Image: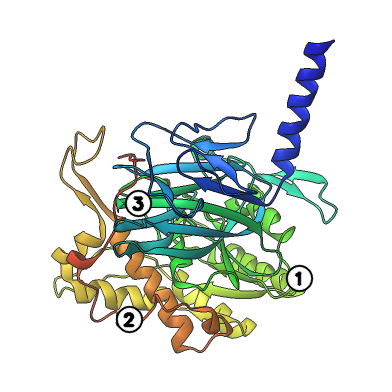
């Protein structure tokens, strides 16, 4: 009987934790701030508790005395990942970073390497409080009452992703990341920017692959806006429907939200008819988004890295970019012409330097990579970052309503003058894979 009571208590506490939406974690040594959950270097993720580090090897804590919350911290000489079991939704995360007796340098990403904070440096003795806003999702489709009515048909490789696993995972990276506390709170009022698309948009989990969608959160102010990237490699508009990815969005999107739509690469490859398939579905999505009170924004697919003898980009996307431009005019919706901007960007880089924006690496640069990587469609982190800046530039230049939510991280950008790659900051994550994403 006592064992049964013990089991029931354990089960209920685990269930209640999984339903909990507000958390206060104190990272450090043996001292804990009142009302906070203590997190030690030994706090490995525990399904029963519902929180902890993915890997505790290399984690260290330091206690400088003084304030119980900010006087101590956890650090590591390699990227470390903290996960929390949490219901899907939008959340604000408040972080205390720094060292009361030293300096620090921290980059923060969430889920599948979604960039949130980049190269946050604190001076000797400085503690900074930073806020990020994160969208957490699962594969269950629910109605307005929260009842399950369907499920997103995930691909086998997606089951390994960090953004379909019913956990919020925070990646702490950089030269000297020092974390004192993590506070997680629901954010029910933020506008959600839903992103749909293919492998050039997806939150890519593995180095060296990356897409503009996972860089976008860095350029928006937290609390006001949350980026929800539902793109997936290899998808066409039709496949996005068939796998119920768009159904998931239709059952979550609310008035005031945005829906960014970028498809073309795989629609072209699949031989889909522009008139009867591509344009028809785009119009249906636009109509549905408007019906639900959301704002649709079309994004033309960026060019592939294919140059002619005059070092000009060759259009390899047939009439798909033009078809999207036509739909934007016909339906009177916003258009981000990433196709045109990417042409300018890649031509400014030139045939050789543009390789630095794509997945071009010599053999054995990454684990299980015996041959050269030479991909003219998919981007590395630098290329993805530059394309994200193109997207933001279009929002600003066109004075779209989203402009007021652009953060100070965006200064200005000219595709004719790409950022110096040698000044681009991206400490690599621990997840690496040489396998090419679906799609081309």
**Of residues 92 and 289, which is closer to you in this image?**
92
Residue 277, compared with residue 5, is above or below; it is below
Asked whether 160 or 238 is in front, the reply is 160
Q: CA distance from mark 3 to mark 1?
A: 42 Å
Q: Please give the residue where the numbered disc 2 appears in the rendered image.
A: 413
Q: Which mark is residue 177?
A: 3
Question: Helix, strand, or loop for circle 1?
Answer: loop
Name the quadrant containing residue 144: bottom right
Provide the secondary structure element on which disc 3 rests.
loop
Q: Check the picture and name the quadrant holding the N terminus.
A: top right
> Do the numbered discs 3 and 2 sit on residues whose CB atoms are within 8 Å?
no
Counting other residues with Cα less than 10 Å from the Cα at mark 1, is it few (<14), some (14-19), or many (20 or more)? some
Q: Mark 3 to mark 2: distance in Å?
A: 29 Å
Residue at 33% x, 64% y: name it: 122
Residue located beneath label 1 in the image? 292
- Reading the chain from its start, which is encountered first: label 2 or label 1? 1
**Considering the numbered disc 2 on the image, is that residue within a helix, a strand or a loop?**
loop
How far separated are the C-alphas under marks 2 and 1?
33 Å
Horizontal arrangement in the rendering, residue 303 relative to residue 181 (left or right): left
Residue 387 found in image quarter: bottom left
Q: Is residue 77 above or below residue 280?
A: above
Q: Which mark is residue 32?
A: none
Q: Which percent across, then down, holds residue 56?
A: 41, 32
Horizontal side of residue 380 vs 61, given as left or right: left
């Amino acid at each position: 009987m006592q064992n049964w009571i013990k089991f029931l208590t354990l089960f209920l506490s685990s269930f209640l934790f999984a339903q909990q939406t507000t958390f206060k974690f104190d990272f450090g040594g043996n001292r804990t701030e009142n009302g906070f959950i203590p997190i030690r270097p030994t706090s490995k993720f525990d399904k029963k508790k519902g929180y902890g580090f993915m890997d505790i090897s290399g984690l260290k804590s330091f206690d400088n005395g003084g304030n119980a919350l900010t006087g101590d911290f956890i650090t590591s000489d390699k990227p470390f990942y903290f996960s929390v079991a949490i219901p899907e939704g939008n959340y604000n995360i408040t972080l205390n970073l720094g060292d009361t007796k030293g300096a620090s340098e921290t980059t923060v990403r969430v889920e599948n390497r979604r960039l949130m904070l980049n190269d946050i440096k604190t001076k000797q003795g400085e503690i900074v409080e930073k806020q990020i806003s994160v969208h957490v999702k699962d594969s269950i489709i629910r109605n307005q009452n929260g009842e399950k009515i369907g499920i997103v048909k995930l691909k086998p490789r997606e089951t390994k992703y960090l953004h379909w696993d019913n956990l919020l995972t925070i990646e702490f990276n950089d030269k000297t990341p020092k974390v004192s506390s993590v506070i997680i709170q629901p954010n029910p009022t933020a506008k959600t920017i839903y992103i749909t698309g293919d492998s050039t948009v997806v939150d890519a989990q593995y180095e060296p692959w990356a897409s503009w969608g996972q860089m976008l959160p860095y350029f928006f102010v937290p609390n006001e806006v949350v980026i929800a990237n539902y793109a997936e490699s290899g998808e066409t508009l039709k496949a996005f429907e068939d796998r119920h990815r768009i159904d998931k969005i239709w059952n979550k999107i609310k008035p005031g939200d945005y829906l960014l739509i970028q498809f073309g690469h795989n629609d072209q490859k699949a031989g889909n008819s522009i008139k009867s398939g591509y344009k028809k579905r785009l119009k249906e999505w636009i109509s549905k988004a408007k019906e639900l009170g959301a704002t649709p924004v079309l994004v033309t697919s960026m060019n592939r890295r294919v140059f002619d003898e005059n070092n000009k980009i060759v259009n390899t996307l047939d009439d798909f970019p033009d078809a999207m431009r036509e739909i934007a005019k016909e339906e009177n919706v916003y258009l981000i012409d990433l196709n045109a901007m990417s042409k300018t960007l890649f031509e400014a880089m030139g045939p050789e330097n543009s390789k630095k924006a794509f997945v071009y690496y010599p053999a054995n640069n990454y684990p299980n990579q015996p041959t050269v990587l030479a991909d003219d469609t998919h981007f590395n982190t630098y290329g993805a970052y530059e394309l994200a800046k193109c997207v933001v530039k279009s929002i600003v230049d066109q004075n779209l309503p989203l402009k007021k939510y652009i953060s100070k991280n965006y200064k200005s950008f000219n595709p004719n003058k790409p950022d110096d790659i040698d000044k681009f900051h991206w400490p690599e994550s621990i997840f690496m894979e040489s396998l090419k994403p679906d799609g081309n």
